[in-house]
Amino acid sequence: MLVHLINGISLGSIYAIIALGYTMVYGIAKMLNFAHGDVIMIGGYVAFFAMSEGAGLPAPLALLLAIIVCTILGITIERLAYKPLRSATSLAVLITAIGMSYFLQNSALLLWGANPKAFPDMFKNAEAIEFFGAKISPVALVAIFANIVIMVILTLFTTRTKVGKAMRAVSEDKGAATLMGINVNFTISLTFAIGSGLAAVAGVLLCSAYPTLMPTTGSLPGIKAFTAAVFGGIGSIPGAMIGGILLGVIEILARAYISSELADAIVFGVLIVVLIFRPTGLLGKQIHEKV
Amino acid sequence: MKKFSKASTASKKAFLNYGIVIAFFVIFQSLVSTGNITSALKGQLIPIACYMIMAVSLNLVVGISGELSLGHAGFMSVGAFTAVIVSSAMAGSSDKGSLIVSIIVGALIAAIAGFLIGIPVLRLNGDYLAIVTLAFGEIIKNILNCLYVGIDEKGVHFAFNNPAALAMSAEGKVIINGPMGAVGIRKISTFAAAIILLLIILIIIQNLVNSRTGRAIMAIRDNRIAAESMGLSPMKYKMLAFTVSAAMAGAAGAVYALNYSTLVPKKFDFNTSILVLVFVVLGGIGNMTGSLLAAGVLVVLPELLRKFSDYRMLVYAIVLILVMLVTNNEKLKGKIDTFFKKLRMKISKGGRK
């Protein structure tokens, strides 16, 4: 039971890190960035090739490289595909994001082939740790630790720094933020950069925990993390964390005790039940309609 | 007087749709009978008609009712697997009879699924509604992945998540085998049947949209609060559109399934829902003619690009992004317009010289 719980929290931490990318972008640009899951996959591939025999970089450098590549990728995607559609309908932006997701997946397919790659074990030397009689893999611990660190830094960033406050202001009211002298375009780009950098971290963690890497690796975790973001209340940073962890725990427990075939159905079922009773997610803000 | 002219433009549009469908049928049927068609394209004819039905039925939800649904393929799969079971159970009957009954039962079961799913879904708004339809699409796929159905002389046996529970006699055969999907499906769909179904569905949509009910649905889409204060029940009308659309998707799924000998639940995943949504958006939201054309062109396009097999999905993605950018960005639109104007002027000047 304890093992499943901790594995669940670890998987949930990875979901939470991905969900942060969704939730921040949604909060600020009011768009569902469907390409986010594929940025995760790109991050995984970059780290994979950095650590492969040709390059042979140590794991921390590979992670750093993945973060840099994904951040640049995120900003480029935003500039090329989403920025021109800032005033378009949300459906148009959604379809563009889906197109971008197809584009990234098929580029990866062409560049690196459809065969799954075995992601190298980053923690070869570390041993599983005993915790009240339960064996816990080092990846699980690193994921949980990374999630906590990221969450603390992001919370401090959005509440204490000027840029972070600008970010919150833009997500609250774009027009008013512009009037207050905030550079809205820069703020949105920055959000994409942070989200994509986090996607790289999540990609490396995900591939370390489940070491098969394919062009479609990012899609299902992407959808689930997105569900986690909605679950916690989209647009809310603590919501993404709670949603992600709950989702991970539910998934692992369902897989262990009910049925591995039905685990995904149970995860989505819980989401639906939560949304029926709290239509804006666990920590989402209730928006009152004005006539 | 005004009312009459309005009605006539609406019916003109409807006849344009019927005309397109009939022309599509006549052209391709004559190509098939004269043997002037590649076998790959011939095999795509029924799926094209099915995707056209999917596109117009999703357009009813997205365009007319104004709700973004990301799980439309789920209803298609409900119809598809229902039709597989019904047609196998009717193994002794004629092909035509089995096909008609399969389509009707498939549509009915999909409508029931649509109604049940609509109860929680339609309470939500906007992006939340979209994500819940996505979730239901995935749930349907997962449940079908656990479904085992067998048939023997005693009748149809069902089992869930445990193939051993089928408890069939020695002569029985398994028709739906969990994640392996349906096997040994009766291939009884015909192109003509698919086209007739498409025409019937277009007539239903046309009459629904131009009725009192249709106007109520659109009024709720345009301003829910105003419509509510006029005494319209949003839940009732949204549910109506959602259920009808689900039934149509179920019918499309039935025809689609009975065109193949094997079928896996994975065929109707999130990507299929998105594919149909792309038809609707590229064809123009709320525009049935656009949906028909977009579905036709976009199903055939990857086939035509088969020469560049490795690059075709990449090209598809780029085309999708570019079309969205060009049609939705004012600046880009303006630039392209002026470019064409200049081009035209240059051509006309060149002609004068």
Image: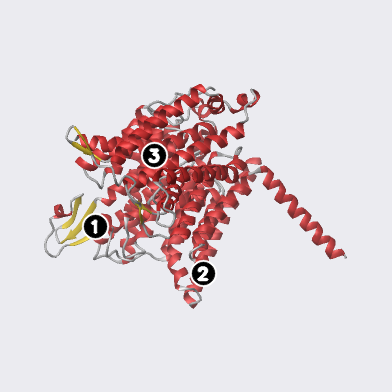
Q: Position of residue A44 (x, y in %)?
A: 41, 48
Q: Which residue appears farthest toward the right when viewing the image?
A: B353
Is residue A62 visible to us here?
A: yes
Question: Judging from the image, what secondary structure is the residue with disc 3 in?
Answer: helix
Instruction: Inspect the image, locate mark 2, and give the three-letter code of the amino acid beneath it.
Output: Lys
| Residue annotated with mark 1 | B177
Q: Residue at x 40, y 66 (%)?
A: B190
Image vertical order of residue A214 relative to residue A242, above or below: below
Asked which colour scheme the image uses, the reply is secondary structure
| Residue annotated with mark 2 | B307
Q: Which residue appears farthest toward the bottom when viewing the image?
A: B34
Mark found first going from the N terminus, 2 or 1 = 1
Is residue B67 visible to us here?
A: no
Q: Position of residue A187 (x, y in %)?
A: 57, 32
Residues beneath discs 3 and 2 located on the same chain? no
Picture quarter with the N terminus of chain A: top left
